């Protein structure tokens, strides 16, 4: 595969990836990697594979391609290619919580001679280092790194970098329990996505929505927290990002716990886990969550007393009667009686649940 054909195939993969045909894009890029002899093209396609696996939460594969990219950069004997590959190696270790390695690789980036680290990738290096310091609970160093990354973003009009830094600052202020700032920065990230993110990956919207959900929950705005978390989960499911799915599941559980509806939180967790396992073809885990979901339904008596179907398994309009029994609206309408089918109490006009 020649240089021109390599460029065409990389571009084809990018178009597929941006249209959310991720697996097809990966197949195109892997084919380039197998057949192309163009070292620059191979380096670029490895960068695409690193980014794609990062956004899908496949961090071990991300690290594997980052290591291959460093070998390719060394063959090219180009300092800027080497800088980019070391940054990808730092980011991969950051995602795998190897924070000391992340800091070491970031320092290597900053110490490479003859590179454009200041203008080109300095902000991303500072961001990755800040995330690593935060993972090690070195809060002062983390804040210094985030502020440096934010200056790079502003000086270079890099809205995408600013969005990522704002999400990290949201996480930082959550950990130091300044919930006002913990909400401010993810909201700023969401504004950047709305203003500039038309061509960005949906991952940026998912990140900002997740961090907003956490901050809203800690601030006591549970309705807004649920709305943001559902939006983030929807995107995570669409992209197959299992780490983000797990974070959203934990956030859902925390929201329900804050509301005091512990049984409903278990139902939500098992229902969402079931959909994840079904999409991944994990049959054993799928059966376990289905069984546990129905056990929770029985324990909480959350089923319609007329048709016997579980309440909460699918979207449907419900009615709660003054006696506190809950039925599907359609079942009550078809039943044609004004008294509760369970306890026979007379029912006034109840509201929708």
Image (cartoon, grey):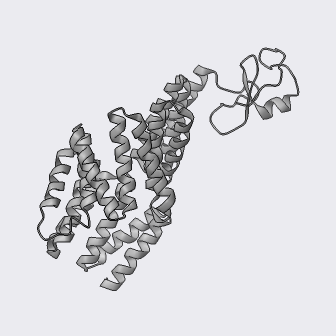
The foreground one among 241 and 203 is 203
350 left or right of 181? right
Asked if 146 appears above or below 69 in the picture, the reply is above
Judging depth in this view, the residue of 196 and 49 nearest the camera is: 196
Quadrant into which the N terminus falls: bottom left
Q: Residue at x 83, y 19 (%)?
A: 347
Q: Measuring from the top left, give residue 28's x and y in whole percent.
A: 39, 71
Q: Is residue 43 above or below residue 210?
A: below
Give the left or right position of residue 4, taking residue 66 as reference. Answer: right
Q: Is residue 211 above or below residue 307?
A: below
x, y percentage for residue 117? 21, 65
Seen at 35% across and 72% down, the residue is 31
User: Can the viewer see residue 2?
Assistant: no
Camera-side residue: 190 or 262? 190
Q: Measuring from the top left, give residue 161's x and y in whole percent.
A: 35, 58
Q: Quadrant of the C terminus?
A: top right
Query: Residue drawn 24% across and 49% down?
Result: 145
- The residue drawn where x is 84% and y is 16% is 346
Q: What is the x, y in percent for residue 32?
A: 33, 74
Q: For this view, does 85 lie left or right of residue 339?
A: left
């Amino acid at each position: 595969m020649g240089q021109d054909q390599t460029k065409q195939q990389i571009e084809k993969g990018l178009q597929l990836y941006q249209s959310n045909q991720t697996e097809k894009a990966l197949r195109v890029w892997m084919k380039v990697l197998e057949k192309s002899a163009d070292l620059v093209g191979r380096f670029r396609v490895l960068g695409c594979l690193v980014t794609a696996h990062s956004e899908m939460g496949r961090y071990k594969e991300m690290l594997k391609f980052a290591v291959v990219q460093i070998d390719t950069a060394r063959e090219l004997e180009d300092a800027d290619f080497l800088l980019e590959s070391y940054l990808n190696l730092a980011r991969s270790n950051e995602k795998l919580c190897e924070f000391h390695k992340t800091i070491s690789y970031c320092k290597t980036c900053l110490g490479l001679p003859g590179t454009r680290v200041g203008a080109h990738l300095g902000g991303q290096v500072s961001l990755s280092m800040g995330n690593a310091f935060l993972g090690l609970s070195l809060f002062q160093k983390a804040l210094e790194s985030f502020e440096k990354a934010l200056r790079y973003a502003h000086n270079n009009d890099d809205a995408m970098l600013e969005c990522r830094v704002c999400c990290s600052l949201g996480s930082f202020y959550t950990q130091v329990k300044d919930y006002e700032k913990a909400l401010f920065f993810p909201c700023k990230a969401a504004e950047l996505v709305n203003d500039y993110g038309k061509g960005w990956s949906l991952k940026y919207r998912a990140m900002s929505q997740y961090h907003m959900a956490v901050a809203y929950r800690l601030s006591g705005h549970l309705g807004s927290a649920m709305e943001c978390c559902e939006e983030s989960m929807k995107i995570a499911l669409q992209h197959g990002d299992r780490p983000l799915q797990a974070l959203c599941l934990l956030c859902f559980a925390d929201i329900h716990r804050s509301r005091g509806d512990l049984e409903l939180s278990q139902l939500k967790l098992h229902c969402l886990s079931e959909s994840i396992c079904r999409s991944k073809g994990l049959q054993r885990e799928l059966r376990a969550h289905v069984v546990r979901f129905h056990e929770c339904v029985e324990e909480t008596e959350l089923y319609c007393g007329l048709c016997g179907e579980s309440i909460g398994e699918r979207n449907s309009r419900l009615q709660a009667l003054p006696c506190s029994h809950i039925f599907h609206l359609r079942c009550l309408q078809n039943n044609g009686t004004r008294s509760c089918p369970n306890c026979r109490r007379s029912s006034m006009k109840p509201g929708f649940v």
